[in-house]
Image (cartoon, rainbow, N blue to C red):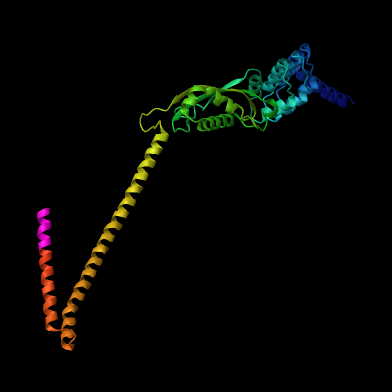
Amino acid sequence: MKGFAVIGLAVLGIIALVIVGLFLRFLGVWIRALMSGAKVSLWSLVGMTLRRVPPSLIVDARIRVAKAGLMLDTDVLEAHYLAGGDVIKVVVALIAADKAGIDLSFQRAAAIDLAGRDVLEAVQTSVNPKVIDCPDPKKTSQGMLDAVAKDGIRLLVKARVTVRANIERLVGGAGEDTIIARVGQGIVSAIGSSPTYKHVLENPDEISRKVLDSGLDAQTGFEIVSIDIADISVAGTAGNDVANVGAMLETERAEADKKMRQAEAEGRRAMAVAFEQEMKARVQEMHAKVVEAQAEVPKAISQALREGNMGIMDLYRMQNIEADTRMRKSIAGEEKKEGV
């Protein structure tokens, strides 16, 4: 019996030592939580250790919440830590949102944090709107948007977009890159619909108003507060840049029309030359027919003499008439040359 009693006392001693050891290990954290009004049971601290959750981290988060007048159970804080979230950042975001009068629950803040968004930055952006350069100078060589007005003049534009985080749409909503892309598209479209580049230079606020009224922040995690044209200028002519795209296009079009008209004229000239050669051939053909007809005349006269249809006197008279006609033509030709 004495042996069993000794063993029992030894086991109780070991248990007591373990309890004392645990108490001493978590004593500081437990006292800090108790004195801060964020009481946490000793067994909860032991359970956190067994679940590989840093007790000091959870206690610190709970103390911050309690001092801010909020209350969160340690279970939700542990669950968020085990899910891979940043407990302290979520707690600080909740406190900042509460002080700023922004309705933000722990579940939504945890979801934003687990989605990879900076929940604290989102709350700060809701209170203090953020300014974004459009286009992003880190992703463009010249840091300017390139747009062309209706008159063909190229303009270089830089805008500043002021945005406020939309907590309700932050999870699942598009980010800053989408805002920059949409604003850039809107500015290029607005300038493209302007009649002249002078109108754009004189009324840059009109471009901002058109873009702002387009609802570019739909399905994004931000709300566009304002769009301001920071810089606008006519594109330079250095290098291969062409400032007047309209003039360049008109010049190219005129050159193309010129070549087309030249080709058409060359075609018409070739057709005229071919027609002229055809007419010459037809004249030669007609002349050959005349010569052929004239060759038939002596045959006809001989036939008429043989058949008695024509006498010798008739032949002489016809020859005299022909001689007289040739003489008259000769005289007429000489008189015409003298008149010339």
Q: Is residue 40 left or right of residue 157?
A: right
213 or 296: nearer the eye?
A: 296
152 or 89: nearer the eye?
A: 152
Considering the image in quadrants, where does the N terminus appear?
top right
Q: Residue furthest bottom?
A: 307
Q: Is residue 82 visible?
A: yes
Coordinates of residue 243 in the picture (x, y in percent)? 40, 30
**Residue at 11%, 75% in the rendered image:** 319
Q: How many marks?
A: 0
Query: Where, by quadrant of the figure, is residue 56 drawn?
Result: top right
Is residue 336 highlighted in magenta? yes
Q: Is residue 253 left or right of residue 53?
A: left
**Residue at 9%, 59% in the rendered image:** 334
Query: Where, by quadrant of the figure, is residue 19 drawn?
Result: top right
Coordinates of residue 144 in the picture (x, y in percent)? 47, 27
129 or 241: nearer the eye?
A: 241
Q: Is residue 98 left or right of residue 16?
A: left
Coordinates of residue 271 in the picture (x, y in percent)? 30, 58
Is residue 253 highlighted in magenta? no
Q: Residue furthest top?
A: 35
Q: Is residue 52 visible?
A: no
> Which residues make up the magenta segment?
331-340
**Residue at 15%, 85% in the rendered image:** 305
Query: Where, by quadrant of the figure, is residue 28 drawn?
Result: top right
As displayed, is residue 37 above or below residue 333? above
Q: Main secondary structure of the magenta part?
A: helix
185 or 74: nearer the eye?
A: 185
**Residue at 40%, 32% in the rendered image:** 244
Q: Is residue 75 left or right of residue 290?
A: right
